[in-house]
Amino acid sequence: MSTAPKPRHIGRNISRIRELRDMKQEALAIAIGVSQQTVSSIEGSENVDDEKLKAIAEALGVTSDVIKNFSEDAVFNIIGNTFDIDNNNGSSVISYGCTFNPFDKMFEAFDKNEKLYERLVEAEREKVALLEKLLSEKK
């Protein structure tokens, strides 16, 4: 018996990321220009079209890929690996987990990638402008 990987439920991922960002459905609805009922419907959908997903991702401050690949298992693993041990006086805490918020690190990495992409696009624009200038000078 083979178990195929369970397909990602995009709407549920949107809902969880929205909740982790402490954003209400109404706020997301306003950000993407739809009603709260539409956001509720989207969050109940297994698939979301790419254009709508891109708008939602932008409103949530993430990329579409973050939404598509979001995994609650990773979050639960982090939470599950952080626990307290009471050694009779209750004053000792041992943490076997992250000392930082992994979502913050993930969002930092996406921000860095976005800034890098913007710099690359700007460099390409400058090259095109220079080439156009050189071409117009030759005429």
Image (cartoon, grey):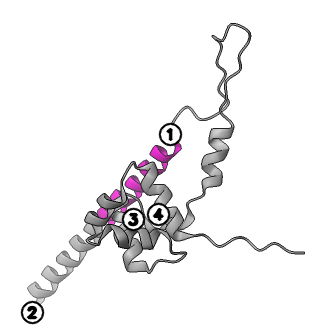
In the picture of the structure, the residue carrying the numbered disc 4 is: 14
Image location (x, y in percent) of residue 52: 37, 76
- Which residue: 36% across, 73% down? 38
* Residue 98 drawn above or below residue 76: above
Earlier along the polypeptide chain: callout 2 or callout 1?
A: 1
Image location (x, y in percent) of residue 5: 73, 71
In the picture of the structure, the residue carrying the numbered disc 2 is: 139
* Residue 98 drawn above or below residue 122: above
Alpha carbons under labels 1 and 3: distance apart:
20 Å
Marks 4 & 1, CB-CB < 8 Å contact: no
* Residue 37 drawn above or below residue 108: below
In the picture of the structure, the residue carrying the numbered disc 1 is: 101
Image location (x, y in percent) of residue 17: 47, 56
Q: Main secondary structure of the magenta part?
A: helix
The amino acid type, in three-letter code, at marker 2 is Lys
Alpha carbons under labels 4 and 3: distance apart:
8 Å
Image location (x, y in percent) of residue 120: 33, 66
Residue at the extreme top of the image, as rendered: 89
Alpha carbons under labels 2 and 3: distance apart:
46 Å
